[in-house]
Image (spheres, coloured by chain):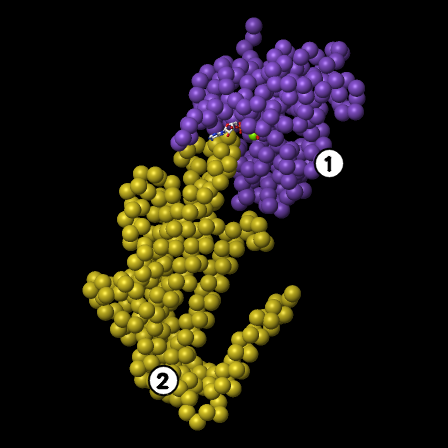
Amino acid sequence: MTEAFLELRDVTKSFTLPAREVVALSTTSLQIEQGALVCLLGPSGCGKSTLLRLVAGFEQPSGGNIIFHGKPISSPGPERGMIFQDYALFPWLTVRQNVAFGPRARGMGRRSAGDLADRYLDMVGLNEFAEVWPHQLSGGMRQRVAIARVLANDAKLVLMDEPFGALDAMTRERLQQELLTICAQTGLTVLFVTHSIEEAVLLGDRVIVMSAGPGRVVSDLAVSLPHPRDPTDASFNDIRRGLSEALHGGHSAAPVANGEPQQ
Amino acid sequence: MTFLGRAVVALGLPVVCLLLWQIAVSGQRYSLIPPPTEVAMQWWDMLVGGVWDDAYSATMLEHAWASMYRVFGGFGLAAAAGIPLGLLLGRVDLVRRIVDPTLQILRPIPVTAWLPLALILFGIGPKSAFFLVFLGAFWPILLNTVFGVRNADPRLTEAAAMLGVGKTAMFRKVVLPAALPSIFTGLRLSLGISWVVIVIGEMTGVRTGLGAVIMEARQLSRTAVVLSGMVTIGALGFFSDYALLLIGRRLLRWKDGND
Ligand SMILES: Nc1ncnc2c1ncn2[C@@H]1O[C@H](COP(=O)(O)OP(=O)(O)OP(=O)(O)O)[C@@H](O)[C@H]1O
Ligand SMILES: [Mg+2]
């Protein structure tokens, strides 16, 4: 059997507060294959963000191992890029400088980092805004910059924590399509946290459902509908209903079968 | 609004105040407070001479320079000490635990309470004034720098770590720029306080400086000279603050509302 791209083995995470111990993530095991867009779905507080932060290396697991490319994760690193819901752009850098930040930090010259940044700004359709400060951009544009910033930094795995949650419906739909296009172009592996079932079915090659806190995986479903997916489609709705049951029923432990026949 | 329009609006209130002042004091046979016209004449005489030709004529620049030297010297020293110390205190827990309690005890002591000690330590003279300005300017710079460092958004540190910034570069690449707005707030507060403190400092028996002029003229009942000194301090305070504001705007032009 080939080695998984990303593997969580019996990972747990608890936080020690002054008064008590909070279990944020109870024993979770997962394998993510390379090139997949995996959506992580679950009720608020079930540990989705915690899982992402563990994979990013911002937090250390209390138990278990996280193996990425055959090596345990010990700290944040450029091969695992995070997209935050609140963008986390550096306000004192222009859009171009933000995108060039990673390559610059890792020793690339100013000129080539700038060229690289321009290439990725092209990809997300923001080349005209290269010289602008982040606060002059709309939310959707800021999130595009954040995506370009992670791509320019050669991330192999992109971790997205409700990245489109703060955007209006139209902007969200556009960014969802752009994300799919980018994934198709680059073969990126994405771990995408959302609390919208529709978004999960629209984007995911695979949807993982976690139960209410402390989180664990209750359902793991491969979605093989062809893109572009149509939310009004009957098969789309079958999958959505199945996920909704898994999400609200709590322990429909058996993995749900594919919603649609494979092509 | 155009620049001219704004200037007219801004000048309206002072002009009205001056008019009221003029009306209030003129027509009285004997007034302790001279009318603005007389103050203006006195101010002009102190600046270039040729009106009264007395001991105060054409001395303004000398006094203004003396005060500015002490203000900017003390302020500069406070910035040179306060910013690095603030960065350290905000960043290194060990330093904070060692130094912070001492600072917290020293901080509530008003600058004026230091005056007698300053006279003993540095004698009557410009050094005491310098020292007092330094003390007054030091605290706002220090506290705002610490605040800026400690309030740097942890999200941005995480974003930088995720992009490949190591522990040592983190300070220069993220913490310092994130703290800059707060540091500038501290600098502006301090410069304002420096002008307050300098007048107190120069009342300790130095012969030059705007504070000294005001004290001496008060004893001689030359109220127009006192008022001229006050006007000059006001103007210098205003222009130095404005200069700092412009520098800040340039350095912080990335901030929302600064463009
Ligand atoms: N740094 C922390 N210290 C203490 N408790 C924490 C910390 N981070 C998370 N938790 C707790 O862990 C649990 C899971 O949090 P997490 O943020 O991972 O949930 P989530 O699934 O992302 O929720 P949401 O959908 O609302 O974003 C929560 O109960 C939370 O209070
Ligand atoms: Mg979350």
Residue denoted by label 1: A170
| Crowd class of label 1 (few under 14; some 14 to 19; many from 20; radius 10 Å) | few
Same-chain check, marks 2 and 1: no
In the figure, the shade used to draw chain B is yellow
Q: Chain of mark 2?
A: B
Taking the image as drawn, is residue B127 in sight? no
The quadrant where ligand 2 appears is top right
Query: Three-letter amino acid code at disc 1?
Result: Met
Taking the image as drawn, is residue B6 in sight? yes
Is A40 placed left or right of B154 in the picture? right
Residue at (39% x, 53% y) in the render: B141
Viewer-closest of B41 and B158: B158
Viewer-closest of B209 and B23: B23
Viewer-closest of B183 and A216: A216
Circles 2 and 1: CB distance less than 8 Å?
no
In the figure, the shade used to draw chain A is purple
The part of the image, by quadrant, that contains residue B151 is: top left
The quarter of the picture where the C terminus of chain A appears is top right
At mark 1, the secondary structure is helix
Residue at (53% x, 75% y) in the render: B14
At mark 2, the secondary structure is loop
The part of the image, by quadrant, that contains residue B50 is: bottom left
Disc 2/disc 1 C-alpha distance (Å): 73 Å
- Residue B139 position, x and y percent, is 36, 55
Query: Three-letter amino acid code at disc 2?
Result: Arg
Q: Residue furthest left?
A: B120
Residue denoted by label 2: B222
- Residue B25 position, x and y percent, is 47, 87
Count of all numbered marks drawn on residues in the image: 2
- Residue A12 position, x and y percent, is 48, 19
